[in-house]
Image (cartoon, grey):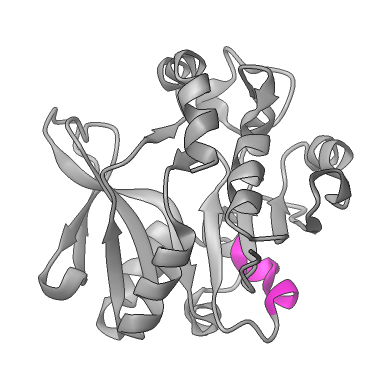
């Protein structure tokens, strides 16, 4: 069953922290088992009925474009929005705006993290609340390397706390979002971070947290990339649930 919603994947970062183990390509093309991490995300989206994907590329963009082309090999349609200079998560999203004209809402995913999630339920959650944005969040036992999300009544996001290096449990942003198109008017021109320059300033417009207690991993550090290799079969199964 197709879902009439586009997904945007942020795949333009340099992956500096992962350079010691993935030195020759962009981070989303890092192998997990016998497939690239980005293919894992594509398979998850396709399995859940999303067939129109926009890649926000930047660093070594040509490698991603050569690998996936127009998406027909995966029975999907891929469009590309390539930044010439690093624009940050917000700037890269705003650059892709033309690919999302007329959309009621759209899904955004980080290209270096995986969350087991039912996207149809996530879209329904967003529509029921009628908010500006919805973000998937997960509780973790150790939020040391993440900022945390404070959630109030009715799943509403009420604030954020920067990472502080303390070993403690917390609820973190899992890097999967549903946005209403109005978000574009809140993203500054040029270089901009969704996390720092957008979310803290739109909480009064309605940002909601969709909490999941399911498999989550990002491959931003050598340690977590190594963990992804150990979990690759579980990740494959989770992508098709």
Compared to 16, does 183 lie above or below?
Answer: below
Tell me where residue 106 sits by quadrant.
bottom right
> Could you say which quadrant of the image residue 144 lies in?
top left
Q: Nearer the viewer, residue 46 or 200?
A: 46
Among the 4 quarters of the image, the one containing residue 157: bottom left
Magenta segment, which residues? 92-100
Dominant secondary structure of the residues highlighted in magenta in the image: helix
**From the viewer's perspective, is 25 left or right of 168?**
right
In the displayed structure, would residue 179 be above or below residue 214? below
Q: 98 and 3: which one is in front?
A: 3
Q: Quadrant of the N terminus?
A: bottom right
Can I make out residue 229 in this image?
yes
**Outermost residue, front direction?**
1
* Residue 46 in the figure: left or right of residue 63: left
Q: Is residue 52 left or right of residue 119?
A: right
Instruction: Tell me which residue sits at (63%, 82%) in the image.
Output: 103
Q: Is residue 79 left or right of residue 105?
A: right
Q: Is residue 232 above or below residue 9?
A: above
- Viewer-proximal residue among 152 and 199: 152
For the image, the number of numbered tags is 0
Tell me what residue is drawn at x 68 percent, y 36 percent: 39
Residue 193 appears in the rendering: no
Give how far across and how far down residue 36 sits, in percent: 67, 28
Q: Position of residue 146 (x, y in %)?
A: 29, 39
In the image, residue 223 sits, relative to residue 122, either above or below, namely above
Q: Is residue 221 magenta?
A: no
Residue 94, magenta (yes or no):
yes
| Residue 202: x %, y % from top left | 33, 77
Residue shown at 58%/13% (left/top)? 21
Residue 214, horizontal then vertical, whole percent: 32, 41
Look at 49% across and 29% down and name the residue there: 235
């Amino acid at each position: 069953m197709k879902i009439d919603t586009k997904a945007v994947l942020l795949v333009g970062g340099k992956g500096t922290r992962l350079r010691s183990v993935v030195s020759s390509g962009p981070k989303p093309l890092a192998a997990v088992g016998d497939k690239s991490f980005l293919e894992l995300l594509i398979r998850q989206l396709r399995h859940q009925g999303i067939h129109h994907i926009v890649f926000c590329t930047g660093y070594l963009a040509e490698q991603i474009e050569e690998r996936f082309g127009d998406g027909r090999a995966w029975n999907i349609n891929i469009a590309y929005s390539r930044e010439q200079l690093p624009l940050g998560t917000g700037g890269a999203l705003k650059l892709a705006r033309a690919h999302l004209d007329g959309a009621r809402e759209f899904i955004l995913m980080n290209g270096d993290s995986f969350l087991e999630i039912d996207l149809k339920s996530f879209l329904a959650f967003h529509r029921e609340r009628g908010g500006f944005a919805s973000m998937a969040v997960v509780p973790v036992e150790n939020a040391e390397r993440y900022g945390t999300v404070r959630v109030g009544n009715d799943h509403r996001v009420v604030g954020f706390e920067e990472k502080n290096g303390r070993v403690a449990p917390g609820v973190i942003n899992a890097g999967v979002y549903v946005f209403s198109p109005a978000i574009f008017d809140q993203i500054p021109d040029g270089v901009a971070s969704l996390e720092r320059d957008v979310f803290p300033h739109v909480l009064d417009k309605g940002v909601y947290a969709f909490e999941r207690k399911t498999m989550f991993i990002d491959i931003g550090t050598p340690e977590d990339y190594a963990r992804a290799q150990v979990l690759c079969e579980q990740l494959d199964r989770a992508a098709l649930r």
